[in-house]
Image (spheres, rainbow, N blue to C red):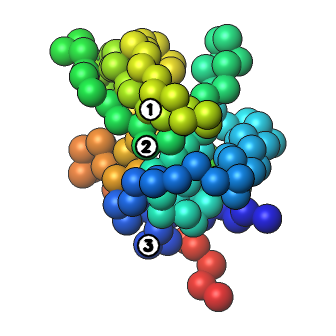
Amino acid sequence: MLQMKLCGDVVLRTVCEPVDKITPELLSTMDEMVQMMRAQNGVGLAAPQVGILSRFLVMMDPDSETIYRMINPRIVSYDSDVCTMEEGCLSVLGNDGLPIYANVSRPAGVVVEWTDVTGDQKMAQMTGLPARIVQHETDHLDGKLFVDHLSSVRREMVMRKVKKRKLS
Ligand SMILES: [Zn+2]
């Protein structure tokens, strides 16, 4: 059973290692992550969010409801156009246990390459929500959170609302 890691946990600030082999364990972990993402009404979940320091993620295009299972995803180009959208994260929760949202500016479109669950190389050009989600999720693989894209003043405002991780 995977457990959601919350802001304050060092796993969310660690750069993940590439996946070198697609194993049945990896595939079942990704299936479980898809279930967790759906259960929490999320649109993406990256491995470090469940404590695994490995470069893979799951995400959903909310419009088509297409599910992506990406192994070793890499953004190979960014649009020069930037847009601002509200973002939240299943690892950045407020005291009510719900994600905290903030407006984040990022490139409006990206080209992403990844290995799929069968080992095939894929490439896609994404715009709109999928472009936003894949940038947020690949950031996780590099130990980055969406709050890192905010000005220091706005980041402070968000972080003040963040529920402190229970120390056990
Ligand atoms: Zn996130």
Where does the image place residue 6, in percent across and percent down from the top left?
57, 63
Which residue does the numbered mark 3 point to in the structure image? Answer: 10
- Quick one: SS at disc 3? helix
Where does the image place residue 99, in percent across and percent down from the top left?
61, 46
Which kind of residue does numbered mark 1 sit on? Trp
Question: In the drawing, what numbered circle is on residue 156?
Answer: none
Ligand 1 within 8 A of label 3's CB? no
- Can residue 73 be seen here? The reply is yes
Q: Quadrant of residue 151?
A: top left
**Quadrant for the C terminus in the image:** bottom right
Q: Quadrant of residue 139?
A: top left
Which kind of residue does numbered mark 3 sit on? Val
- Name the outermost residue toward the bottom: 168
In the image, is 78 to the left or to the right of 109?
left
Viewer-proximal residue among 7 and 44: 44
Q: Quadrant of residue 159?
A: bottom left
Viewer-proximal residue among 132 and 18: 18
| Dot 3 or dot 1, earlier in sequence | 3
Which residue does the numbered mark 1 point to in the structure image? Answer: 114
Which kind of residue does numbered mark 2 sit on? Asn
In the image, is 71 to the left or to the right of 112?
right
Q: Name which residue lies at 44% across and 32% down.
A: 114
In the image, is 86 to the left or to the right of 97?
left
Where does the image place residue 49, in percent across and percent down from the top left?
56, 57
- Quick one: SS at disc 2? strand
